[in-house]
Image (cartoon, rainbow, N blue to C red):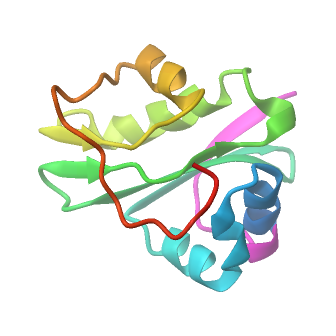
Amino acid sequence: MSIEIKNTREITQEQVLELYTLNKWSAAEKPDILYKALMNSEELVSAWDGEQLVGLGNAISDGYLVVYYPHMLVHPDCQGKGIGSKILSRLQEKYKDFHMQILVADGRAIDFYGKNGFEKAGETQSMWIYKGKEH
């Protein structure tokens, strides 16, 4: 497997939907909105095995001080092979000097982000109004 990391928006809605469906993310139930959201992110980084989309991460930012990483997905058959770390590394090339890099992690993702330099934010408590069901 030869993985190429790209900063590109040349991703079809069908490719996005397949990745989200395979990962059982509820955003796949809103394909048009999901696709628009990703295409309007400040940064969109993807991982490719030839023509197959095998990973994706995005960033939303004020452009100067704060960045939020809302989505990071890797094809289930490709997880544990460093693809997520490569996507995150590419995102952090742009945002490494920002005052605050934020994300929400649960389940196995907590260990992944911990290995990639993130830590629990003091005594903060994650809060949200969430319409999904996978968490």
Magenta part of the protein: which range?
1-14
- Residue that sits furthest to the top in the current view: 115
- Residue that sits furthest to the bottom in the current view: 32
Image location of residue 134, percent across then percent down: 64, 53
Looking at the picture, does residue 85 appear above or below residue 102? Answer: above
In the drawing, does residue 42 fall left or right of residue 102?
right
Quadrant of the image for the N terminus? Answer: top right
Along the viewing direction, whichever of 45 and 60 lies nearer the viewer = 60
Residue 114, located in which quarter of the rendered image?
A: top left
Residue 98 appears in the rendering: no
Image location of residue 76, percent across then percent down: 81, 38
In the drawing, does residue 81 fall left or right of residue 124?
right
Q: Does the segment drawn in magenta span residue 96?
A: no
In the drawing, does residue 81 fall left or right of residue 107?
right
Report the residue at 75% width, 72% height from top.
Answer: 12
Image location of residue 57, percent across then percent down: 54, 49
Report the residue at 36% width, 43% height from top.
Answer: 103
Image location of residue 2, percent across then percent down: 82, 29
